[in-house]
Structures are given as structure tokens and as C-alpha cells.
Amino acid sequence: MSKENSLNSYEVLHGSALDPALIGPTFPPIPPFTFPAGPTGDTGPTGPTGSTGDTGPTGPTGSTGDTGPTG
């Protein structure tokens, strides 16, 4: 084996360590399969209500109303 061939074989093996698709036969991907499933069951009961959150910030003060009648 010449020095050139040994260098090339190293590069190919090194390349396969980074991307295994670079060496060997390439086969088409195997499609995934699933077993048939039955009908979906009824929805379960609603869970309990969670706790109340924190009170929000106070809003801006409204405008002053009309002055009442003089007594």
C-alpha cells in the first residue's frame, strides 16, 4: 500500500466518524409504521379549580364629580 493510499483511507475513516453516511452502501430510509389503534375513549372529568392569582395594580383615579347643592 502506498503512502497516498494509506492517507486516503485515513481520511475516509476520519470522515465516516463525523458523518456515517459517507461510507458504505446507502439504503433508502425505512418508513415508520404504527399498529392500528382503536377508537378514542371518553374525556375524563374536569380537575379542580386552581388558586386565585394575586390582585392586580390599582387603576388611575377618575375625574372629580359635580359639586352638590348648597345647604
Image (cartoon, rainbow, N blue to C red):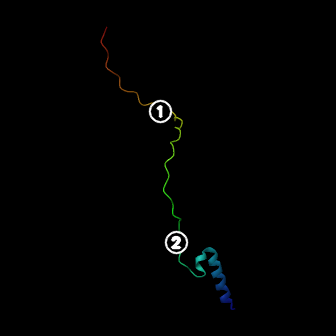
Label 1 crowding class (10 Å Cα cut-off): few <14, some 14-19, many 20+?
few
Q: Residue at the spot x=55%, y=79% of the render?
A: 27
Q: Residue at the spot x=66%, y=85% of the render?
A: 7
Ranked by sequence position, the earlier of labels 1 and 2 is 2
53 shown above or below 12 = above
Q: CA distance from mark 1 to mark 2?
A: 56 Å
Pointer 2 residue? 31
Pointer 1 residue? 57
Tag 1's secondary structure? Answer: loop
Q: Residue at the spot x=31%, y=15% of the render?
A: 68
In this view, the residue farthest toward the front is 38
Front in this rendered view, residue 70 or 29: 29
Q: Position of residue 51 (x, y in %)?
A: 54, 35
31 shown above or below 1 = above
Q: Position of residue 2 (x, y in %)?
A: 68, 91
For discs 1 and 2, the disc positioned in front in the rendered view:
2
Tag 2's secondary structure? Answer: loop
The type of residue carrying mark 1 is Pro
In this view, the residue farthest toward the bottom is 1
Q: Position of residue 56 (x, y in %)?
A: 48, 34
Tell me: 52 left or right of 70.
right
Q: Which mark is residue 37?
A: none
Where, by quadrant of the figure, is residue 63 drawn?
Answer: top left
Callout count: 2
38 shown above or below 26 = above
Q: Which quarter of the rendered picture does the C terminus lie within?
A: top left
Q: Position of residue 15 (x, y in %)?
A: 62, 78
Q: Which quarter of the rendered picture does the N terminus lie within?
A: bottom right
The type of residue carrying mark 2 is Pro
Label 2 crowding class (10 Å Cα cut-off): few <14, some 14-19, many 20+?
few
Q: Residue at the spot x=62%, y=77% of the render?
A: 16
